[in-house]
Image: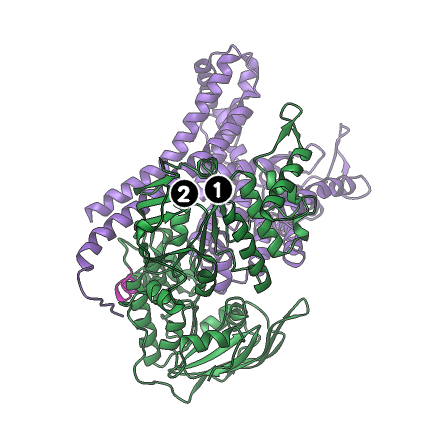
Chain colours: A purple, B green
Amino acid sequence: MNKLNADTARRIGLSVAAPVLAVALSVVITSIVLASAGNDPVETFTQMIEYAQEPRTTTLIINAAVTYYFAALAVAFGFRMNLFNIGVDGQYRLAALLAAAVGGAVELPKVLHVGLILLVAVIVGGLWAAVAGLLKVYRGISEVITTIMLNSITTALIAYLLTADKLAVQVEGSNNIGTPEIPASGRVGGIDLVPDSKLQVYGLIVLAAIVGFLYWFVIERSRFGFDLRATGRNEEAAVASGVNVKRMVLISMAISGGIAGLVGMPQLLGASYTYSLDFPAGIGFTGIAIALLGRNTAIGVAIGALLFGFLDTSSQILDLEGVPKEIVLITQGVIVLSVVIAYELVRRYRIVAQQREVGRQLSSAAGSEDSKPQGAQA
Amino acid sequence: MKPESESAGVPAVELKGITKRFPGVVANRDVNLRVMPGTVHAVVGENGAGKSTLMKTLYGMHKPDEGTITLNGEQVVLHNPSDAIARGVGMVHQHFMLADNLTVLENIVLGAEPKRWGGFGLNRAAARTRIREIGKQYGLEVDPDVLVENLGVGDRQRVEIIKVLYRGARVLVLDEPTAVLVPQEVDALFEALQVLKAQGLSIIFISHKLDEVRSVADDITVIRRGTTVATADPKTVSSRQLAELMVGSELPSPQTSESTVTDRPVLEMKHVELVKDGRHLLRDVTLTIHAGEVLGLAGVEGNGQAELVESIMGMRTVDGGTITLAAENITTWTTRRRREAGIGYIPEDRHRHGLILDAPLWENRVLGHQTRHPNTSGPLVNRAGARADTERIVGEYDVRTPSIDVLASSLSGGNQQKLIVGREMSGNPKLLIAAHPTRGVDVGAQAAIWDLLRNARAEGLAVLLISADLDELIGLSDSLTVILRGELVAQVDPSTVTPEQLGSAMTGAGEAA
């Protein structure tokens, strides 16, 4: 039993080793880049960390992370099944536009109104992703290709729909156009999570936590999740075990898209109340990086989302200090790369170590059994 | 048996005391091999005897744990295949390593391109000349400018051989080269080998087709259970003697005891047809397996066995006929429903179809039984139940593992297979499909798996047994059916048939029983 505990300890140690290694590596590389550009790395990092501790910045970091979390979970859900949903970007933008249009067009009691908007977003995101799923299942087209193409189609579709005679109205006092503002009954108020901050944390952080828990529960504890993980790890064995892989592809793609539909919601229901031309775009791609960073687990992705939120938000201080804030892009890129490499190294090390362990235990056991006559029991 | 002193001169290849261990198994133990220049040296042995491991050692794909490799009298350490190539060892893999969308010339020079324009250009003219020279010298003619995707299997193999010669190989390792060839192509290959031999090259020819080995080889080394057990002279040895050397005499025999066959049909297939691209993969297959009966399906690989199994499992949709399990028509059922109805499946390729290698054992226990007690309750996985039942399987089926949390990839082939057998016997199956159940497992595990199959049969299970090991088929089966080109062509009585008769029935050469 002691031995097992030691093994468990080592396993936990190894799984912590990888991300720590990765972050350390990226800090080192970023420092080298900073130093070679004539900036003091220690100074730069200190500034970013100090800036992050200001209440206002902390709130912004959390808010960015909430949005990133949905995007990364959407991507991660597909990844667990070897599905590459590159189309989260298009899915959330289309979902946000249509949800905003519906939300701005009706007057309902609070819970129903918010629920309706969220439901529209999930359904639109899910259906839009299901297009790629259908094409994969019935035409064998890689979802990587279709989701990328659907992103472009989304951009065109939104440009078409977001016009004054379709879904949009002129925003007062500007050239911007957007959907009619969602009335108060459809908005989600903020939470005073950070003391002394004038800004509030998105109320939908609660939804993010719920979705994160459901993600973990479905993937790790449910039969559906087992089928999903089995398909991701060995599709042929999954087929032989009775998994209907085509159905799984369709459902998983739709769920991934459904989660993607929520990406724009914190912004829409908590800040802008309208989908206008300047609605944030490109979050889907950040989600891919965070999913990789968080190894597709609910907790890992949450940490990754906070880290990216920190880097994005804190970098704002750098320009004021004369350091190009684009330096964080390098850090982010290096983090993702080093995480992938570090995890792969640790994974291989673990497999080899385990095989050696099994081999050693069994060969010492076999030595005593070989002398016995052949006796297999059933 | 050939005395060693007969061969004079320096051997082109000499392996001494090679031992290679993998987790849980010793793949090669004290292997000795001497190949003289200008000879064809056959290495024969059963599936899983360790031939491929040995050749990978010679080709530098892994380092031996013990022993030495000597090439032309010089002891060498090969770190990777490039080392081996540099020392004149070339390998033609069983599965061709060619890029279909490149020309023959491009495939041949790939990785060893003659350069021009300061290293940026491919000197096609030089390559073409070189390839034509090789073609003339060794009688291996092939048009360098044709796309590989347009070539037949025999030509592709020729390209592989030229590729190796182009890199200056003096020792050619051919891994089961005839497995994919039709008889005419085999003859052409053997002619080419004679030319290569006459030019002083050495050829190591790996095979388990004994007649071919005897006709082409100058020397034969037999590998059994990871070690070289004998050398033989192809002129004097008979195929039967070779087979005995390969199998050994102490092998436990797969005899069944008294018959347990009942008259209760479990699986009935009637006029099952499977057509793909206008070709019949299965034609008018009709068979019945009763409770307590082991039906053996004999056939050369690739004659529809895999398709038959996948039809029963519901992994393929049949194009005609009906499949009935315990009086229920399951022809249109999904794989999961069929499994729930009581079909157990030991797949032919356990790594591809039977296991998730990078998942722990207990998760592999759930695989294929995702909807059943004790693995799941309702829509949730019952981790405690699945783990407890995995412990039971590990104990009852003697799976040698330190814990149920190790990854399936850490176990040896035999233990992986015992886990699969245990899993598939769980949940009271009615029908068990066992495809090559003892392939690539060590002798101890083989005997254990045979026992398990016998017990299953005694408990009234219907078993469909597919195996390339004819002794296993004959020994375990209550009735035997021969499959040839997707058709069931003969019924033979396992109590009277010999492996030779069965073998000729499988190739359609003669009538058995």
Instruction: Assess whether mark 2 and mark 1 are in contact (beta carbons under 8 angstroms).
Output: yes
Is residue A187 shown to the viewer in this render? no
Q: Residue, x 50% and y 28% (percent of image)? A: A334
The 10 Å Cα crowd at callout 1, few under 14, some 14 to 19, many 20 or more, is many
- The stretch drawn in magenta includes residue A136: no
> Residue B453: x, y in percent?
34, 73
Give the residue type at disc 1. Arg
Is residue A207 shown to the viewer in this render? yes
Magenta: main secondary structure equals helix
> Residue A345: x, y in percent?
41, 37
Q: SS of the residue at dot 2?
A: loop
According to the picture, the residue beneath numbered tag 1 turns out to be: B170
Which subunit holds the residue at mark 1?
A: B
Segment tinted magenta in the rendering = B392-399
Q: Is residue B89 above or below residue B49?
A: above
According to the picture, the residue beneath numbered tag 2 turns out to be: B12
Q: SS of the residue at dot 1?
A: loop
Q: Residue, x 54% and y 36% (percent of image)? A: A289
